[in-house]
Amino acid sequence: MAETLGKNGLEDVPQDVRFPAEEEKILAYWDHIDAFQTSLKTSREEGRPEFTFYDGPPFATGMPHYGHILAGTIKDCITRYWHMNGFHVERKWGWDTHGLPVEYEIDQKLGIKSRDDVLKMTVAKYNAECRSVVMRYASEWKRVVRRLARWIDMENDYKTLDPTFMETVWWVCKQMFDKDLIYRGYKVMPYSTACSTPLSNFEAGQNYKDVSDPECVVSLPIIGSEPPASMLAWTTTPWTLPSNLALCVHPTMEYAYVEDVKTSAVYVLAVPRLVQLYKKESEYKVLKTVKGQELRGLKYEPLFNFFVERKGDVGFRVLCDEYVTADSGTGIVHQAPAFGEDDYRVCLKEGVIFKGEHVPCPVDADGRFTEEVSDFQGQHVKEADKAILASLKASGRLVKSGAIKHSYPFCWRSDTPLIYKAVPSWFVKVETLKEKLLANNDKTYWVPDFVKEKRFHNWLAGARDWAISRNRFWGTPIPIWHSEDWEEVICVGSVDELEQLSGVRVNDLHKDSIDHITIPSKMGKGELRRVEEVFDCWFESGSMPYAQCHYPFENKEKFEKTFPADFIAEGLDQTRGWFYTLMVIGTALFDKPAFKNVIVNGLVLAEDGKKMSKRLKNYPDPELVINSHGADALRMYLINSPVVRGEELRFKEQGVKDVVRDVFLPWYNAYRFLIQVVRRLQSEEGVTVQGSGTGYIQSDNTMDQWIQAAAAGLLQFVQKEMQAYRLYTVVPRLLRFMEDLTNWYVKMNRKRLKGGAGVEEATVSIRVLLQVLLTLVRSMAPFTPMFCELLYMNLRNLLPESERKDSVHYLDFPQANLEAVNERMELKVRRMQVLIEKGRIARDKRGISLRTPIRAVTVICPNTELLQDIEDLKGYVLEELNVRSLSTTTEEGDMVTRSAAPDNTILGRRLGKAFKEVSAKIKTLTNAELMEYERKGQLDVCGSVLSGDDLKITRSFNGDTETVQAESYDEVLALFDVGLDESLRQEGAAREIVSRVQQMRKKAGLLPEDLIEVFYESSDESFLSILANHMDTIKSAIRVELLPRGRMPGYLQPLVILQSEEDVNGMKISLTITRACLHVSQQAADVSQGVSIEALQSAVMSLQLASAKKSMTSGAIQVAVDGKQVELQAGKHVWASRHVASYILLARRSLEWGRIILSQLRLQATQRALTAPTGPGVA
């Protein structure tokens, strides 16, 4: 932040700014005033109503990525907004510290391959290792979250490993257990062999990949078949074949007995699936066809004999079920009930397996074959595929083998292929809650709504019981104790209850701290022992609304008052994750959704459309992007993208850079310009500007009325849309207003703001700009908090003391000033803007710079109100388009021809099959017919009545297009006279010369108040002609006359700031700018006391103009040279260029003094014979 202060403590604003560095200063300032906690304290003390926000806990075992940054930004924008709207918004950070991510990291670190490895090192030591890494990157997270300006309490956070958190999770479990919503079952589950644990169905759906797997067709000879025939089964998991217990066919599908022409073997497979084995019909002969039901009960020879002894009497037969499809394979599905959900269901239904029995499952916890399958014992199932296929080939049972590319689920943590495996697990009875879940989902509001109505609704409608247990070690233990025969089962809901039941008091609830605790049986069954499993970490994160505040053991009243949460937000991937678990647990406990409103963001992908990958290094480091362009720019880029509508975003660093260029720099420059004109008004006119954050500023100026109306309309829109959590509409509207402010209001009022229309007009326009900028800063504060703070810290100095706050984030969100609301004015200016934009397009098409004036523009339109609006704002159009005249008319004559095109979306939907004929006819409608349509508002086309926006009408120009550029839009045809003569070209060149001088000033880093002299050197006659004809234009723009280089006195050489060789429309010019200074005349010798003129000139030049101004208030200036004090009289001994004279005149506000100096200048201009050098600025 700048340090140079003016009146009222107003700071200078530097031209060059590095936003990341300014953000660091803002963050340091917030730390100094403890801004976030101070805002919370204030809102709490004011007794504001609560706005409840839940933050899903991330793992601290990895660094934050763009997905975290996006979700965090959305959460910060919304919570800041509601705080500024009069609510107390607690924001508490949480950490997910249990589960597979932590355990997997320890397994990799210690080389742990199996469950037995953990037991050998002891669970206590293993958990200690886990505890040591759970907060590994916590400091990095805190650094990034702070750098992003996200206000959330990370000091008083919650961790899922906290005993208080874990105790509430126990309480949640007991409530559900007591409601008979938790049970122990034996089900086929997605299973991670790398992590040795089952996963829930929604976890299994998180990481599908396209992979190549083996596929094979095997033969299973039908016992007693004549002629001998074999059933053909197809699978992509050969490792399940040793566990085959049955085959399944569709009861109504047609199956064929076919003879293989090449081998003479007879096979049975589904008729629609003959293509699985044969490419041509000539390769087989159909012997007969049967329905699947006719195959039911056939016995076949097993592929392997591993389970013949156990299941030979009930297994190895053909079963029927309608889940079999003709989409792939042979239409005959091999059944391995331990490794397939449908296999288990069908075999249980058909009596191949029985409820409660140990289903043949020859795979251990680590995914390796057990001794039950002795031929492949010890091999990992996925690695055993080759050996199994080789064995089948050797036995003559392998009919066909190959590879298939398909989508397959991978473990979301270890990134290894999942298998499906029958395991004992603890489940929540989600299926019994289904109707309540759907009803509670209807009570919630989602952005975007399709996620609620389609994706989430469908997931709930098809939800299955939720497996909440994991066969792991580092997690919250499931608090269920049981007798050896499972006839006595109790669920413990608190530490106190455990102590009452066991007599043991614990401080830590982890597995190694409680597994030794037993509970005496009340049924005489000895000691009850805890089940081995721990909770799935999703159960913990779904319990966070209650566990973060240790409900119901503490904060009971506060929680019940603020539940459900007003707002949550996460990514689309949480539809089956956190959103789901919140909904299930909230419904199970209270029959309520856990949240009211949710924003669902899409996925952030790499620029190439692929998933961001550390390994591929296909995305820029977030912290490098922040340090290069600023966190606010990154925030704005993310929330102004399709990703806030639940769509994908391909992240491009250039997009962040564009935000700086297109948003922050124009905004900053408008703010900088305001400070400059305020300080100019204070220093030159003695007028102190004081604004207000509220109220309507009365003004006769159209643009003042418009920008205040636009600001009021903006606030009405933002309030409405933010109430609906639609960031994707709010941010674009805010940016559009910023465009109106910076590129329209400021640009079109620049001269007026700088005093060109007088002090009173300047004061009014400055107050309007100040108030609108303050409105924009306050309304953008939730979205770009640091940039807004940067501007507010200086702008607040222009407010009354009573309205100033230490931070913009302590202010209320601005409310629309109803007095300023003026939709008619907004429309009026919008019409002008469109015309100007079309004029710029017309110039671009003809290659005519805006600096070159064009002769005229004619606006043709039947809408008289629109034409009057253009006439009312004619002056702005003329100036902005640099056009000499503008005329409007409703008379088209023969200049205009209309053509039409159908609105395909509207008409296609409404007309259906008739659209094709109507569409063709529309394109042939005549100008007269289209005029009739405009006049009556409707037209019959091929029997269909068209009206409103059914047609898109375009106007074209029939006249001479060589010198006229026509632009058509809405009901307007604008004709721009683009024929240029020499006078127009010269005026354009003069403006280009002004531009080059201004560019030199900018390059030299000069401020508007810095005074200069400008000298040229050129022999180009065209250039000299332009100076002769347009010197007044140039002088009024750069505030000094261009002089030949030969008239620059030698003593100005040290004051040269910049010299530049320029090519202006082919004219070669050398421009030199110097600092302005005072000049000593030869008459000073009369009072010099022997000091040379050269020494006096050096002494005068060494004075700062501001100092000289102060000294000359008495009409004289004192200089000390060689110990002598010499007094020089203004206008006699010392004089100035016109530029400096004006400067001193304004400073002293003395007409007499100004006349003295200007008189002296005129005198010296006529006395060419004087020996004193000719002064710069003298014509």
Image (cartoon, grey):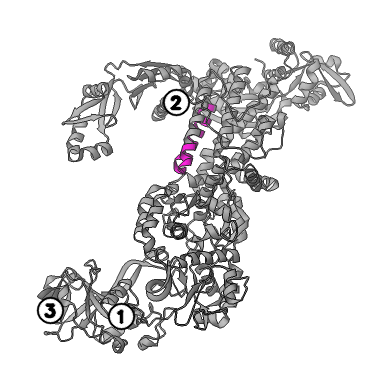
Instruction: Give the residue number, with chain letter if any, for mark 3.
Output: 259
Judged by its main secondary structure, the magenta piece is helix
Instruction: Give the residue number, with chain letter if any, for mark 2.
Output: 823
Q: The residue tagged with tag 1: helix, strand or loop?
A: loop
Q: Residues within 10 Å of mark 1 (few under 14, many from 20)?
A: many
How far, Cα to Cα, is label 1 from label 3? 34 Å
Q: Is residue 381 above or below residue 438?
A: below
Q: Is residue 634 left or right of residue 1005?
A: left
Name the residue type under label 3. Answer: Glu
Instruction: From the image, state whether disc 1 or disc 3 is nearer to you.
Output: 1
Q: Is residue 900 left or right of residue 36?
A: left
Q: Is residue 436 above or below residue 952?
A: below
How far, Cα to Cα, is label 2 from label 1? 75 Å
> Is 425 or 237 nearer to us in this picture?
425
* Residues marked 2 and 1 touching at CB (< 8 Å): no
Q: Is residue 34 above or below residue 762?
A: below
Instruction: From the image, state whether disc 2 or disc 1 is nearer to you.
Output: 1
Q: Position of residue 839 (x, y in %)?
A: 41, 26
Assign the N terminus to one quadrant of the image: top right
Instruction: Give the residue number, with chain letter if any, for mark 1.
Output: 353
For the record, the magenta segment spans 718-745
Q: Position of residue 60 (x, y in %)?
A: 56, 62
